[in-house]
Image (cartoon, rainbow, N blue to C red):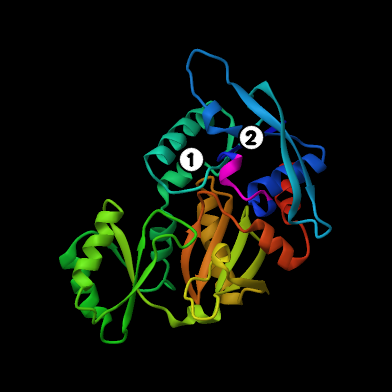
Amino acid sequence: MKHILFIDPIEKLNPKKDSTLMMATTMKEQGIEVYLLFEKDFYVSNKLKNNFKVYDFQGEFYEDGCYQKSFELKESKIVELTTKDTIHMRIDPPFDTRYLRYLWMLRYFKNSGINVVNSPDGILKFNEKLHAYTQKSSLASYVGSSLDGFMEFVNLMKKDNQELILKPLDLYQGYGVEKISISDPDLKAKFEAKVKENNGAIVAQPFCADVVNGEIRSIYFKGRELGSILKVPKSGEFLANIAQGAAFHAIELTPALKKECDDICKELMDEGVDWVAFDILGNHVSEINITCPGLLVEVSFAHKKNLALEIIKEFR
């Protein structure tokens, strides 16, 4: 049984704390046959065998067993995929046309009997933000490009809120997030500019002051919580993003939040989505990450154990 991790180019990643490379190194340490597959070598053919040019690698962890001390690509080789093998979809968003093409191509392999994690069908079906907004606990949200609809939402929100968050529907790591005042005289222009910048529908929500106390990241695999952390923004900041300087520490989900996450995972598992990372703000599920769930290294470090081992158990 081979594991093929389909990933972005190494130069785009931070090997020290990349979730996929942590998984790859852990698999290798456990004696699992595992390779890296890059976009430049990925293709589909209905006439050729499922042969891929993949790369071997060598990685080493620091004493904490989570962060990588070193990571190096080794020689390439050609391997043939069979129905005993698994492709791991680990390409980072944005969820654009490029990303969509890869999901369609992965669907070809899934339909030929090769296991794909997360399932391309499941990723195609659920938008990470919109699916979160269907939950009872979610913040009030507007998604669209209609100025009239946006202003109607603003009029509803301004009774109890002074600020809004505008953000893209299909980016990640806090990119493109903007906080604006509801009373800003340029509110309409800023909305239209954000729509133009993102080529269509964007998200608007009331600013949640709870963010200064931190945002939760909770990682699940096959319906089981592996670990959760609280990400706390830098002083004076409102983005609880570790890549942008937020601190973090281990926490436990409240029973109510855990039940909600458990229930969402049961639904997603029915669609072949096994690896899920929740973002939770206050008591609100704000995002359900399924395209390329991250922070496995940080959550592992906070809980003082390599959680990739827990994921690997499910493939034994």
| Secondary-structure class at tag 1 | helix
| Residues at marks 1 and 2, CA–CA distance in whole angstroms | 13 Å
Most extreme residue toward the right is: 63
Image quadrant holding the N terminus, namely top right
- Numbered tag placed on residue 105 in the rendering: none
Q: Nearer the viewer, residue 142 or 108?
A: 142
Res. 49 image quadrant? top right
Most extreme residue toward the bottom is: 160
Magenta residues, start to end: 10-15
Q: Are marks 1 and 2 in contact (CB under 8 Å)?
A: no
At horizontal 60% and vertical 65% (from top left) the residue drawn is 218
Q: Residues within 10 Å of mark 2 (few under 14, many from 20)?
A: many
* Circle 2 residue: 86
Residue 131 coordinates in the image, percent (x, y): 41, 59
Q: Nearer the viewer, residue 18 or 5?
A: 18
At horizontal 70% and vertical 49% (from top left) the residue drawn is 22
Residue 284 coordinates in the image, percent (x, y): 47, 73
Q: Is residue 130 visible?
A: yes
Callout 1 amino acid: Pro
Callout 2 amino acid: Thr
